[in-house]
Image (cartoon, rainbow, N blue to C red):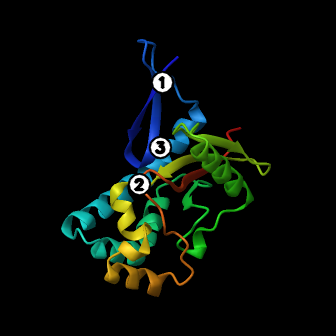
Amino acid sequence: MKKITVISLLAVTAIYAVNKEPKKEMPPIVKEGVGYIKMMGKELKMNMKKHMKADKSGVAAAKFCSQKATTIAQEVSKKYPKGVRVYRTSLKVRSDANKPDETDKKVLENLQKEMDSKTFVKKPTVVKLEDGKTRVYVPLLVEKACVKCHGDTSKMNPEVKKIINERYPNDKAIGFKEGDLRGVIVAEMPNKK
């Protein structure tokens, strides 16, 4: 059966069958996790778009990201129920604070294998942890605007490169091309009793 992936805000996806079959429902835990991810994504993406639109060079967005994104994420996190956290991670992180743990690495490596073998389908991945929590992972793909700060450094605006080098001396989040797997955004939640 042929499927089409419909992409919405912050890489949240829903899969539809072409032959007029009803939309597949996400399990409740996935819906809940995706909801938290959307809350975070909406705020960060709205601000990032505003800065990219105001300054096509990427300088304003790089300044925003390095100075304000963490604060905005912390403010949004206060709106989540107790025990819920949302974070971003990657195999190539910009900030050491976003390093993946072993579970994150396994999910990311699996997604990258799927990308490499051309079997990747953009959908949430669910992992139940031994500590009574569940994680919902949503893949983040590199969009055209992303390469201004995460692409080939030889093509990067020198001011953007300077901001990144000053703020993130251990940066590894470069060399991406449009369509690459940038990382994941993760909602971690306590299991329901």
Q: Residues within 10 Å of mark 3 (few under 14, many from 20)?
A: some
- Left or right position of 58 against 101: left
Residue underneath mark 3? 35
Q: Which of 192 and 147 is in front in this view?
A: 147
Q: Residue furthest left?
A: 54
Determine the residue positioned at 36% across, 74% down: 156
Residue 160 screen position, x and y as percent: 35, 78
Residue 54 screen position, x and y as percent: 19, 68
Give the structural element (helix, strand or loop) at label 2.
Answer: loop
Which label's residue is closer to the chain start, 3 or 1?
1
Residue 177 screen position, x and y as percent: 44, 58
Kind of residue indicated by mark 2? Glu
Res. 121 visible in picture = yes
Q: Residue furthest front?
A: 154
Which label's residue is closer to the chain start, 2 or 1?
1
Residue underneath mark 2? 178
- Callout in the foreground (2, 1): 2
Q: In this view, does 126 lie above or below 51?
A: above
Kind of residue indicated by mark 3? Gly
CA separation, marks 3 and 1? 23 Å
Contact? badges 2 and 1 (CB < 8 Å): no
CA separation, marks 2 and 1? 22 Å
Res. 135 visible in picture = no
Residue underneath mark 1? 3
Q: Is residue 90 above or below residue 66?
A: above
Q: How crowded is mark 1: few (under 14 residues within 10 Å), some or many (20 or more)?
A: few
Kind of residue indicated by mark 1? Lys
